Amino acid sequence: MSTLPDETQKRFIAVLTKKMDLGRTLNVLGHLSVGLSDQLKESEACYVDYQDMDDGVHPHLSHYSIIPLFHYPFIVLKADNSNKLRKMREEAINRDIKFTDFTSTMIEGGSIEQQQRTKQTKEADLEYLGVCLFGGTETLREFTKKFCLYK
């Protein structure tokens, strides 16, 4: 077994607007998670396979440790509105933090239609539904600490 990285150094944080129903919220979170994971190099995140007693494999889950609870925690927070998500996105860009975002232009139709609709919308007019980040724990805390846990 290889040496696993220190679980306190980095984390995933997703911040979602509280103005969505549960189904839409889960859909947005799924898209954000997959998009962000695709950006990460193998050296940045650590995934492990779990094996059950029957030799069944439960593949590629984020490594965690019992102490302190999670390896790279995945924290889900809520934002009051799109503008707060926009500011967080800008902060991620300014700090060169890996992120992905999801806007209302990405909801209806297929991805080609969604891309066209997004292309025809000024950034200031985009309604952000969620942003997902991966980076150093302390750096992310500096600008996400004002958000509450999503419950």
Image (cartoon, grey):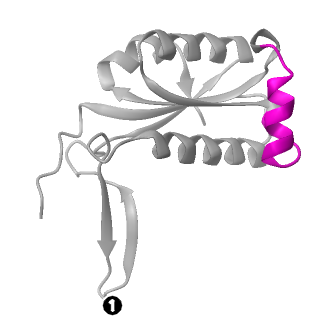
In this view of the protein, can residue 16 be seen by the observer?
no
Residue 75 drawn at (x, y percent):
46, 35
* Picture residue at 48% right of the left edge, 17% below the top: 144
Q: Residues within 10 Å of mark 1 (few under 14, many from 20)?
A: few
Q: Secondary structure at mark 1?
A: loop
Residue 47 drawn at (x, y percent):
32, 55
Residue 9 drawn at (x, y percent):
24, 31
Residue 36 drawn at (x, y percent):
51, 39
In this view of the protein, can residue 8 be seen by the observer?
yes
* Picture residue at 18% right of the left edge, 44% below the top: 5
In the rendered image, the vertical position of residue 52 relative to residue 47, given as above or below: below
Q: How many marks?
A: 1
In the rendered image, the vertical position of residue 145 relative to residue 44, given as above or below: above
- Residue beneath label 1, please? 54
- Magenta stretch: includes residue 150: no
Which stretch appears magenta? 106-122
* Residue 25 figure quarter: top right
Front residue of this view, candidates 112 and 33: 112
In the rendered image, the vertical position of residue 91 relative to residue 148, given as above or below: above
